[in-house]
Amino acid sequence: MGFPRTTINTAIKRCEKKRKTSTAKPKTRPGRPKKLSVTYVASLCLSVRRNLFESYAYHQRNLAAAGVIIYRYTVIRHLKTESFLFLLFLHPCFEAKLNPRTEEEPAAEVWKRSKDGVGFFWAGGLGPLSFLEGFIDQDAYVNCLSKDFNSWYKKSDGEQKIMFIFQEDGASCHTGSYTTWWKNRWEIKRFDYWPSQSPGLNPIEHVWHALKANPKACILQEWERFDPGLLRTLVASMPDRIRAVIEASGNHITY
C-alpha cells in the first residue's frame, strides 16, 4: 500500500494497546516544564497586589533576584492567566456628577501620589505636606488626615469664616468605608461624586509640575540650609576612607 514499515508497526501497536486500555489515541505528553512554578506564580501575584502601579519590568526584576530569569511577555502571560491584567492596563473613566460650587466656597485640593506623599492647598495658600512610606491605603490616608490635615482644615475654616469644600479624586483609599466614616465623623464637607481618573480636575497637579519645572531653585534653597554637622562628619571620615582604600588596593569600599 506504500506505507512505511514504521507507520504500520505503530498502528499495530496502537490496536494491540486498545484491547488493554480501550483507546488507540497517543498518550498526551506533558511537554516542557513551565518556567514559573506554582510557588513563584503565587509570589508574583502577591507582588502585584502589594505594588499595583509598578511596571512589568519591576516584577520581572523581582523574579530575577529570586533566580527566575524570564521574559517580560512571560510575566504578562502569567498575570493574564491569573486575571491580574486589569490592574496594570485598565484606566476607567466614570461620569462625574459634581456639586456646583460658588466663589464663597473655595475647594481644598488634595494631592496623592503613591510612595511620595499627600499635600493640600487652597486659593489662599499652601497647607501641610506629608510623606508616606509604601502604598497609600485607607489606614495610611486616614492617619495622614487625622495627623496633618484635620487641624489645618478646621483652623482655616474657622479663620476664613467661609465654607471649605474638601476636593479629592475617587481613589479607593479616598472613598472606602473607613475613610468615609472618618470624614463623616469630623463633618468634612466634600463632593459626593468624583471620577477616579481625573487629572484635569486636580489643580494641585499644576503645583507639582511647577515644583518639578524649577528644581534649581529648590536645590539652591536646600543648599543654603544644609546641615553643617554632616559636613564636619564627612571631612572627619577622610582618614578612615583613605585607610579603607589602601586596604582594598584601590577597589570599592563601603563608604
Image: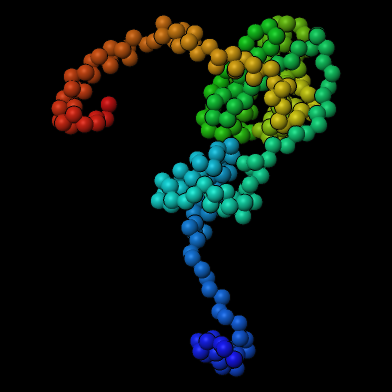
Q: Nearer the viewer, residue 214 or 87?
A: 214
4 relative to 222, above or below: below
In the rendered image, the residue lying farthest to the front is: 2
150 relative to 170, above or below: above
Instruction: Provide residue 250's location: percent of width, then percent of height.
Output: 18, 29
Quadrant of the image containing the N terminus? bottom right
Residue beneath the point at 51% across and 89% down: 5
Quadrant of the image containing the C terminus? top left
219 relative to 54, above or below: above
52 relative to 151, above or below: below
Residue 130 visible, this angle: yes
Residue beneath the point at 40% across and 51% down: 67
Q: Nearer the viewer, residue 153 or 204?
A: 204
From the viewer's perspective, is 145 left or right of 96?
left
What colouring style does the render use? rainbow
Residue beneath the point at 60% across and 23% down: 118
Instruction: Provide residue 90's location: percent of width, then percent of height.
Output: 68, 40
Instruction: Provide residue 85's location: percent of width, then percent of height.
Output: 63, 47
Q: Nearer the viewer, residue 47 or 93?
A: 93
Residue 191 in which image quadrant: top right
Instruction: Provide residue 54's location: percent of width, then percent of height.
Output: 55, 38
Residue 10 visible, this angle: no
From the viewer's perspective, is 231 left or right of 119?
left
